[in-house]
Image (spheres, helix red, strand yellow):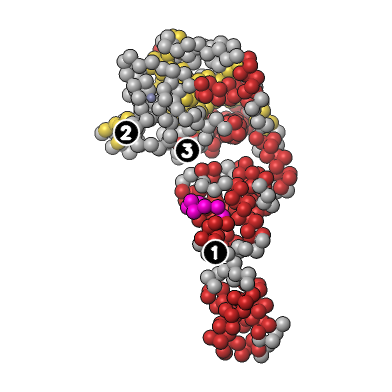
Amino acid sequence: MTIAAGAELLDYDDVIARYDPVLGLEVHVELSTATKMFCGCATTFGAEPNTQVCPVCLGLPGSLPVLNEAAVESAIRIGLALNCEIVDWCRFARKNYFYPDMPKNYQISQYDEPIAINGYLEVPLEDGSTWRVEIERAHMEEDTGKSLHIGSDTGRIAGATESLLDYNRAGVPLIEIVTKPIVGAGAGAPQVARAYVTALRDLLRALGVSDVRMDQGSMRCDSNVSLMPKGASEFGTRSETKNVNSLKSVEVAVQYEMRRQAAVLGSGGTVTQETRHFHEDGYTSPGRTKETAEDYRYFPEPDLEPVAPSRDLVDRLRATIPELPWLTRKRIQQDWGISDEVMRDLVNAGAVELVAATVEAGAPSESARAWWGNFLVQKANEAGVGLDRLAITPAQVAAVVKLVEEGKLSNKLARQVVEGVLAGEGEPEQVMTDRGLALVRDDSLMQSAVDEALAANPDVAEKIRGGKVQAAGAIVGAVMKATKGQADAARVRELVLAACGQS
Ligand code: ADP
Ligand code: MG
Ligand code: ZN
């Protein structure tokens, strides 16, 4: 056993030898609708605090919610993509609890009447096999605001001197997707958990319903873990680790809880049913003991009508469900002829669709990959945004590739053109012209630059004439400098050698 952050942990191999883990994953995803769930306020991330609020999402007396139709459609599409049954009729419920970041003192959610039930997702695992995760339900709710606690080391309320509240997020549409208990994954449980959340993220991204940024909280995962003695069939008591905010952390949190609970059980203790906090350095700590459904005093939301999606609507939405992204990817990977590793890097960078669209626009896949996978990823990181938020389209990247292929730009000059496009200076060709970046293709222009360089460096010229062709590099360098890198270096070299009688 080792000690970490106060809790005793059993070695992982011993955990597996003695216990079977059971998992349950609850994923909250913020929809990327333009407006909130029950009012017309904007949902833009990162706006000045409390600038995207109104009487409805502030819960002021007398205000009434109006349901966002686009959010319902997204919920149905998510349900369909998860192979769920979409119910004919469902309602919202009030979930009553007090929290300063929830101004109404209740959250509008769905309880026993969710919009989508009984689905599954075939999750691809790293070894190439798939794991079928059964989905219990997907339901609609609204997000809460955000508290910011100041003055404590941890950023939590304990020890804080002040707490600030931002209600911009209050009322943003959320879909909560809850799995049925995942049983039988054994030692692979942490990987299955991670693979599921990864697959779900990719699927939601392909659906275009959310920007699924775990780092910005638009996708958050609560992981439930329990252990039962090997061979038992009755589930043990679970802990629920809240708001795990990266894919890696999902895996770490599950594994940590398995080892912690095994140590508790092994020493004759009992696991407490509670929520736990996840810490970035890889451990969990106790939160509150879990409320039961009764504590929330759920009742049907009286201010909203029931939701009864017509079968026509459901069929229309069903037709918009894309192929599973990992199947698309497998096909694309074969077309492009690239390794699993290269593909994984592109996937992690969120570049696959962009590269595919660039290929579609006429670029060879290799060049398209190089642009998005290297230079543009770097630009996106510098700007702190996702690749798809960069101010350049696949068609524009393809246009740059074409200019390079036509010999109008070198790779170096092409990067400057791309920078111009990113800076809003126009289409690639325009930027090239405006910035005067096109390669000098005109022999007579290059010839005069060569003549000048030779005249300015008579000793070097003499060496070349005497047969030391390596010395030509210095003249080529001088010409490139004089033309600000815009001459065609290979052609310049030919001209230098010809001028010195060496060709
Ligand atoms: P809560 O409202 O307490 O969060 P939910 O029903 O929303 O409960 O979600 C509980 C999650 O935990 C579900 O994914 C469920 O499948 C899973 N689960 C239920 N019992 C156990 C258990 N004993 N061990 C692990 N996971 C469990
Ligand atoms: Mg829950
Ligand atoms: Zn509002």
Dot 3 crowding, Cα within 10 Å, few <14, some 14–19, many 20+: few
Magenta stretch in the rendered image = 422-428
Residue receiving disc 1: 437
Q: What is the distance, in whole Å, between disc 3 and disc 2 at their CAs?
A: 19 Å
Residue 196: percent from left, percent from top: 60, 30
Circle 3 sits in a helix, a strand or a loop, which is it?
Answer: helix
Q: Which residue is depicted at the point 38% across and 15% down?
A: 64
Residue type at tag 1: Leu
First of labels 3, 1 by sequence position: 3
Q: Which residue is depicted at the point 69% across and 37% down?
A: 328
On the image, which quarter does residue 94 sit in? top left
Residue type at tag 2: His
Dot 2 crowding, Cα within 10 Å, few <14, some 14–19, many 20+: some
Q: Is residue 274 above or below residue 343?
A: above
Q: What is the distance, in whole Å, between disc 1 and disc 2 at their CAs?
A: 51 Å
Instruction: Using residue 53 as the reference point, say whether residue 479 is left or right of it.
Output: right
First of labels 1, 2 by sequence position: 2
Given residues 444 and 267, the one toward you in this image is 444
Residue receiving disc 2: 149
Q: Is residue 392 above or below residue 437?
A: above
Dot 1 crowding, Cα within 10 Å, few <14, some 14–19, many 20+: many
The reply to whether residue 197 is in sight is: no
Residue receiving disc 3: 215
Q: Which residue is depicted at the point 53% across and 75% down?
A: 482
Q: Which residue is depicted at the point 65% across and 79% down?
A: 495
Instruction: Using residue 467 as the reference point, say whether residue 263 is left or right of it.
Output: left
